[in-house]
């Protein structure tokens, strides 16, 4: 288990556009502005996930990687956190799962608030990769956290107060 600070262009996000709750997003943006600690976002290396993707998704991933070669990680939870951190111009605190034992160890951090309780903690590394395959099979496209956040800003699907100060680059 490794703790890292990642840029939004390094993480392939889940396809839950737009995020489900503007109120949760607002809470996280507020915490970011106050400099509060945000729980780690669990990620898995792209090469690990690749081993579990179906052929059609592998082709789409290859196409995606030509335009986003820096995207080295898939997130498995944390859309509101990653969006809030990106809107706030902050790096994303991530926890890297490289083996199932990392997930079990991360589960111990729930009590301290460093990790949020989620279904991802109940699965092995391989099972989480298979869940990602299923997720992307239902919505077969890839985007980085940065791209998704920009899309939400441009599409005006977020309240203006949340995007105040965010600069499209």
Image: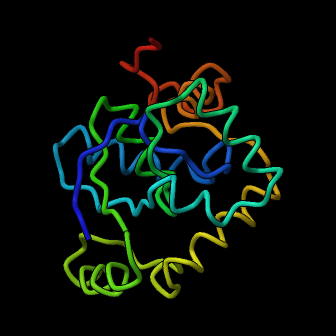
Task: Give the camera-side residue of 59 and 9.
Answer: 59
Where is 76 relative to 155, above or below? below
Q: Quadrant of residue 99?
A: bottom left
Looking at this rendering, what residue extends furthest in the left direction?
35
Q: Which residue shows up at 34% across the image and 85% down it?
A: 101
20 relative to 89, above or below: below
Picture coordinates of residue 48 (x, y %)?
A: 51, 62
Residue under the image location 50 percent in, 30 percent down: 69
Q: Is residue 108 above or below residue 74?
A: below
The number of discs equals 0
Q: Position of residue 135 (x, y in %)?
A: 72, 62
Residue found at x 59% / y 69%: 129
**Viewer-nearest residue: 122 or 84:** 122
Residue 147, horizontal then vertical, whole percent: 56, 29
Outermost residue toward the top?
169
Residue drawn 46% across the image and 44% down it: 11
Its colouring scheme is rainbow
- Indicate the quadrant where residue 95 lies: bottom left
Question: Which quadrant does the N terminus fall into?
Answer: bottom left
Tell whether 57 sits left or right of 150.
right
At which x and y percent is residue 89? 30, 29
Side of 130 where 97 appears, left or right: left
Q: Quadrant of the C terminus?
A: top left
Closer-to-camera residue (63/28)? 63
Q: Is residue 166 left or right of residue 14?
A: left
């Amino acid at each position: 288990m490794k703790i890292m600070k990642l840029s939004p262009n390094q993480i392939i996000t889940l396809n839950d556009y737009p995020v489900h709750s503007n109120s949760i997003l607002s809470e996280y943006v507020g915490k970011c502005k106050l400099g509060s600690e945000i729980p780690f976002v669990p990620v898995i290396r792209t090469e690990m996930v690749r081993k579990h993707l179906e052929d059609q998704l592998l082709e789409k991933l290859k196409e995606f990687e030509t335009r986003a070669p820096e995207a080295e990680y898939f997130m498995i939870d944390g859309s509101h956190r990653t969006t809030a951190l990106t809107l706030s111009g902050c790096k994303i605190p991530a926890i890297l799962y490289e083996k199932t034992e990392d997930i079990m160890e991360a589960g111990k951090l729930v009590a301290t608030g460093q990790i949020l309780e989620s279904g991802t903690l109940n699965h092995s590394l391989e099972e989480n990769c298979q869940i990602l395959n299923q997720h992307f099979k239902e919505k077969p496209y890839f985007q980085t956290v940065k791209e998704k956040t920009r899309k939400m800003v441009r599409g005006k699907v977020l309240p203006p107060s949340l995007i105040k100060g965010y600069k499209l680059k």
